[in-house]
Amino acid sequence: MIARRDALTLLGAGITAAAFPVTGRAAPQFPKGAIIRTVLKDVPPEELTGGATLFHEHLSLAPDFMPKWMSLARSLFPTGGTRAPAQPTPPPQPAPPYFMQDADLMAEEMTAAANDGVACIVDGGHPDMGRDLDFLKQISTKSGLPIVAGCGYYAQPFYPPEIAAWDEDRIARELIRQANTQPVGVLGEIGTWDVMTPDERKVFRAVAKTHLETNLAIFTHTNFGKGALEQLDLFESMGVKPGRVAIGHLGGLNDPKVEVQRTICKRGAFVGFDRQGGPGDAAQVKMVMALLEAGFADSLLFSSDFSSGGNQLKRNGGPGYSKTVTVFAPKLREAGMDEKTLHGILVDNPRRLLAFVPRPGKPGR
Ligand SMILES: [Zn+2]
């Protein structure tokens, strides 16, 4: 019999699997024909059991995206408390080459993440954020780490001019075209910048229509949890099943009673704790443990939304893309989470979100 680690290496990605042993939890069941669409190929969900799948990160953004984001977002940051993001001050204008345009460096970071127990990373960008699909393919090829690319439009301040001009069906047509001609594997991140604007409502409805046509899952961006239920209401009103939706940035709600998160779990959608590895962790750990206590382990998703300064990279002495696994997970263990539950959240839940059965005759490339 070959050792488990050898078997996983033989499966292709060369991922060390020691971080999240399977300890008897029932493996999730996927519908017949379900796949996870990575930028290089469609992968059976059963192949990504060797580590965590991080459902919301950024590997490719335009160099001016974060500076613009920070200057716009400053007015939205709640003052005090733990709700501000971990690294609120990125470098004003990154010196060239920007790390998200340096394929060798990023491939190195992907390999390091894989060695830390990451099996797959979802990039939540799309063209309005400057996401470059070829760059994602390049770093996935170089590192061997499977990468899932997002599809959609981000949020009001970042929309291209056509969003104002198009109606929701025209927007849906464009997204369906992308989903049918590009190797995108999820609709995300789809955002409301603050209170949902009429254009954002149009985009959300178009995303719901695209989901119904393509079966791609959806994950969202909220302003620290604001409007989370409204987002889910909108998707459900369009006929989207809650189990295909993750509502994002809910670690920012800072509500020890986790009322909104609990409601979302009860309705069957996923709750994203997707910005950790920093000073906000303590509050998030409390909320996660409260949801665990309430029986919602199957509804939780963890990721770090890696996007700000290059000082977080391994190359620069930071935790890198694996901080969910190497920084956040240990804090949960310390708070009492067992390995089986952690494995379920990090390895199984994201695969349950992402796996979909492609429509016949629509190859996605
Ligand atoms: Zn993001």
Image (cartoon, grey):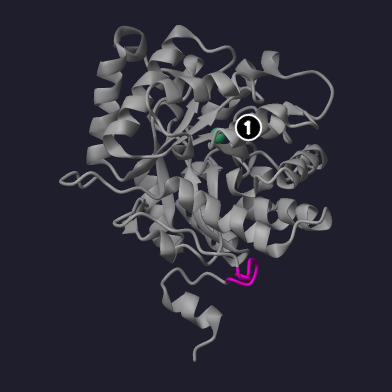
Q: Magenta segment: does it hold 23?
A: yes
For the point 80% across and 41% down, which residue is it? 286
Outermost left residue: 361
> Residue 332 at what x, y percent from top left?
77, 53
Front-most of residues 356 and 14 = 356
Q: How many marks?
A: 1
Q: Report whether 229 appears left or right of 12.
A: right
Q: Position of residue 141 (x, y in %)?
A: 38, 60
Disc 1 marks a residue whose amino acid type is His
Q: Residue at x 67, y 58 (%)?
A: 341
The answer to whether residue 193 is left or right of residue 174 is right
Instruction: Name the image quarter holding residue 296.
Output: top right
Q: Nearer the viewer, residue 94 or 30?
A: 30
Local packing at callout 1 (Cα closer than 10 Å; few below 14, some 14-19, many 20+) is many
Residue 162 rendering spot, x and y as whole percentages: 32, 13
Q: Is residue 136 above or below residue 79?
A: below
Instruction: Note whether residue 102 is visible.
Output: no
* Magenta residue span: 17-24
**Residue 271 seen by the camera:** yes
Q: Specify the principal SS of the magenta part.
A: loop
Q: Position of residue 308 (x, y in %)?
A: 63, 36
Q: Is mark 1 within 8 Å of ligand 1?
A: no
Q: Is residue 132 above or below residue 116?
A: above
Closer to the camera in the image, 87 or 365: 365
Which secondary structure, mark 1? loop
Residue under pointer 1 = 249
Give the residue drawn at x 51%, y 25%.
232
Splitting the image into four quadrants, where does ligand 1 fall?
top right
Q: Which is more toward the observer, 42 or 105?
A: 42
